[in-house]
Amino acid sequence: MDEERARPDQLLHLVFGGELESLRKVRFRDLSALDVVGIYPNYAEAYAAWKEKAQMTVDNAQMRYFIVHLHRLLEPETDNAKS
């Protein structure tokens, strides 16, 4: 049990993106073309990956990348505003 308590929480985050149909709402032009960047163990690493991908696509105004807080979906009862 002590070993389990010593390990940090896994605050999993998914980074993905794709081209939107319009700038007015989040609706992807082609779901089969979504770019799943990866799953990261914390917000800081997810943010770094998101920022890199967002900067690579800066010339396409309709391309958007997002960070999804998977830990909030997997264990909503334990989320107390952790990122």
Image (cartoon, grey):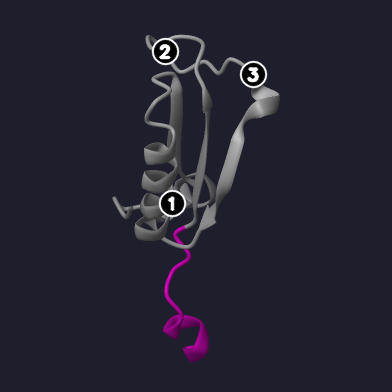
Tell me where the magenta segment starts and ends, as one range: 1-11
The reply to whether callout 3 and callout 1 are in contact (CB within 8 Å) is: no
Mark nearer the N terminus (3 vs 2): 2
Query: Does residue 69 appear to the left or right of 81 in the view shown?
Result: right
Q: Residue furthest left?
A: 81
Which dot, 2 or 1, sits closer to the camera?
Answer: 1
- Residue bearing mark 3: 30
The reply to whether callout 3 and callout 2 are in contact (CB within 8 Å) is: no
The residue positioned 48% from the left and 65% from the top of the image is 10
Mark 1 Cα-neighbour bin, 10 Å: few <14, some 14–19, many ≥20: many
Mark 2 Cα-neighbour bin, 10 Å: few <14, some 14–19, many ≥20: few
Q: Position of residue 67 (x, y in %)?
A: 43, 42
- Residue bearing mark 2: 25
Q: Element type at marker 3? A: loop
Q: Nearer the viewer, residue 18 or 74?
A: 18
Q: Amino acid at mark 3?
A: Asp
Q: Is residue 9 above or below residue 7?
A: above
- What distance separates the C-alpha of mark 2 from that of mark 1? 23 Å
Which dot, 3 or 2, sits closer to the camera?
Answer: 3
The residue positioned 44% from the left and 18% from the top of the image is 62
Q: Nearer the viewer, residue 22 or 68?
A: 22
Q: Position of residue 45 (x, y in %)?
A: 40, 59
The residue positioned 39% from the left and 20% from the top of the image is 61
Q: Element type at marker 1? A: helix
Q: Amino acid at mark 2?
A: Lys
- Residue bearing mark 1: 49
Whether the magenta-drawn stretch holds residue 9 is answered as: yes
Q: Residue furthest right?
A: 32
- What distance separates the C-alpha of mark 3 from that of mark 2? 14 Å
Q: Nearer the viewer, residue 26 or 59?
A: 59
